[in-house]
Amino acid sequence: MDVLIEELKGKLITLLNLQELTPETFDADAHLVGGELGIDSIDVLEMVVMVEKDYGVLINNQEVGQQVFATLRSLAAHIKQHSPTKTP
Amino acid sequence: MNNNRTRVCITGLGLVSALGDGLAATETTLRHGQACLGRLRLFPLLQGAGLPVGQAVFTEDKNSPLPRTHQLALHAAKQALAHSSGHVPDAIVVGCTTGGMLSTENMLAEHPAAASTSICGNSVCANSACRYHALATVGAELARFTGCSGPVLTVSTACSSGALALALALRLLRSGQARRVLAGGVDSLCRLTFFGFHSLQLVDATGPKPMDRHRRGMAVGEGAAMLLLSSAEEDTPLAELLGAGLSCDAYHPASPHPQGDGALAAMRSALADAGLAPEDIDYINLHGTGTVDNDLAEARAIRRLFAQPPPISSIKGASGHSLAAAGAIEAVLASLALAKGFIPANTGFSEFDPDLGLHPQDKPVDKPLRSLLSNSFGFGGNNASLVFAAAGAFPEQPKLVGALPPLAVHACACFTGAGDLAATLARLESGQSCADRVEIARYCTTLPARQLRRLQRLTKLSLALAAAVVPEGKPAAVDSVFMGTGWGSLSETADFLARLEESGQQFPSPTNFIGSVHNSPAGQVALLLGAKGANVTTSGGEQSFEQACFAANLLACRSNRHIQRNDQQHTEQDEPGTLSSLLLGADEAHVSWSPMLDAAICPDTPLADGGGALLLRRDTQAAMAVISHCQLFSGQTAVTLLLDALGGARRAGERIGLILAGISAVDKGLAYAQLEEFRRLCGQHIPVCLYRDFLGQFASASAVAAVLAVSLLREQYIPAVLLTDQKRVLSPVYLGGKSVLLLGCGYTLSAVEFALP
């Protein structure tokens, strides 16, 4: 799962253009939405698209979304659990 | 000339939407309260085939070169003018977001390479297929059809566009500049909006249920509605437009303010403008899209304003959300409701939502109505509310006392390929061209990284302009924003459609869709400055900036009316506010979409972009310049009409010290002929600078020219090297206190005069 977490860090930094972050400074347990990173509902939608596109996991329920995107770690766990293909 | 009678009547109506073609068919549909949504049949879908849409009851003429949007608009205009006794409107204001997008998308579906090649005029054909892409062409076709020779404005503020168009028409009529105005809104379905709203998870696959506890979103619709508004006493009123209120949430690019602050402000402002209190309103026609957030914000705002809310309903459960057309469609329905005395049903509603605390009308009901409030709340927090009344229902009308002083320029800034204002002026003084793409990154360093990270070229440029012109530490003073853009955010549009196509319509980017709407830059500027007043984006081709200026003249820096009630005599003072307004124009050069869309760009035209911004107030104390005239005309008599408006050829000739002429690259012959006629009539002696030769070929070059005008006024001299007849001019030409005229020549003629205060 650590590999997935590192992979997601890189993807989110690029996807959301989080220029102030590096994989080293990206805390996997920090709040994603509404936290220090300033990630909002639009970013969540972008992440939803990415997760479906790159991992084949669909997140189309708002409540599920809120739990899944709580932290990077919870996102990785959800992907690992629901991905149709094996993820490292 | 001031028209003391501010009674503005609606004398013509036309509409076509999913509800039906024309008034009679629409009324029948509404009285049955039935939903008119179905599957999209306009273009093939790989995804989302099951999503309901409100496709208009309209078959395009396949032999016409006009895109669907334009055909819808003309269809509605024809209906509206059918009973107008042949009067040609003095002005036209139309709201639109899609323009020729559907046709462009259809072309790209057959020739995908057209969007990724940077060669223009390629045989595939781009230029002719995209001839009607620009929003400005919608207004232009309406002008051509009606024979209107006066101002034609095309506005684009997402879902509030149609209502904004009516608000502008109202102000125009009250100012006395026009007696009859054709105003409305139009949009056609297209992939951009269909998949755009879907990517935001704002579409309910089971159909919209406005105000319902289980609502999950909207349905995208299309249509057109046009209204003929008149202040001429001899015209027969169907209804009256009593007031309009505009505001901007300045909260978030896609979500409304959760407590409905902006919505509340717009509704309050509309009521004040109409001279009515909340308890005078008999029915509220909701924006009511059916999304979780909109309906909640709107309901909260209504409950804050109305101690006992009147009957309410949204028709979007029946028609879908027609975007720019919505506000105008609902205005036509408002007129119908008032004239016939009935309230349409809130189709799609079944279960009360305690969080909203409002019960909408679930069935159509016959009820005589004296007044009605209609809401249109757009993406980017653009809010518009309109108050309508049955003809003659409120005989005592507030009377306008005194005219607003002209707008004065207190600061200015620009960016071109040469750099900022100082760099641009230095380049110009050496007689060299500034035509190039702006080094945007260089001018964004002081802007908040958080706000910038999701933004692309045009929006960054707009923010940089705003930051450059507003005094540091005083952003709160800016209340309203007026922006002109010929092409909008091309980067986001191109990226959205490219991703859509590459992923087989599966994975378009929500961020790109939000950024692609024409009013996105102005919305971001409002966020940066906390500007919560009117927020207007105009798209008038190479006169986008001039149209924004025209709108600013009507709307900027006004206080809320002070209404005295004294034995039923209402008088009001329309005092200039103490707040400032930002007027800007900007366009981005996209490496492949610009040559594809803009016929002015030829193989040897250097790709150029940029923009200019002016900080405006009504007070002239310490101002750099005053905007003494802002006029728009078209047709064969345009030059004569313009000179009349400028006080006559002789006076204009004595007053004007320099003409900054924008020659339309597409209508060159016509443009040069106009310039020559103008000079012939008011003085061959007036020096001319053909500014596009120096600033670059991009739609909003006139915004930079405006900043140049203000700078030249301050310097009081014109570098000879900029003038067309420089062979005869050896030394700098002194202005000697005279004014600078920004003259836009081509299919439409525009003039903005800058004078010393």
Image (cartoon, rainbow, N blue to C red):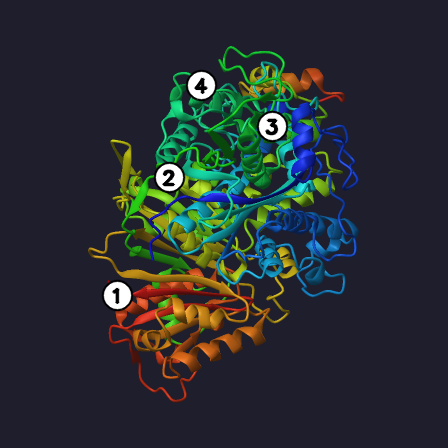
Cα–Cα span, label 4 and label 2:
25 Å
Helix, strand or loop for disc 1 = loop
Q: Chain for mark 1?
A: B
Mark 1 residue type: Leu
Residue B612, above or below B430: above
Label located before the other in sequence (4 or 3) = 4
Q: Are marks 4 and 2 on the same chain?
A: yes
Q: Is there a contact, CB below 8 Å, between mark 2 and mark 1?
A: no
Label located before the other in sequence (4 or 2) = 4
Cα–Cα span, label 2 and label 1:
28 Å
Q: Are marks 3 and 2 on the same chain?
A: yes
Q: Quadrant of the N terminus of chain B?
A: bottom left
x, y (%) of residue B339? 55, 33
Label located before the other in sequence (3 or 1) = 3
Helix, strand or loop for disc 3 = loop
x 50%, y 15%: residue: B358
Q: Quadrant of the C terminus of chain B?
A: bottom left
Q: Residue furthest left?
A: B621
The numbered dot on residue B315 is: 3
Label located before the other in sequence (3 or 2) = 3
x, y (%) of residue B39? 76, 31
Q: Which residue is mark 4?
A: B309
Q: Residues within 10 Å of mark 3 (few under 14, many from 20)?
A: many
Helix, strand or loop for disc 4 = loop
Who is closer to the viewer here, B742 or B169? Answer: B169
Who is closer to the viewer here, B176 or B109? Answer: B176
Q: Which residue is mark 2?
A: B533
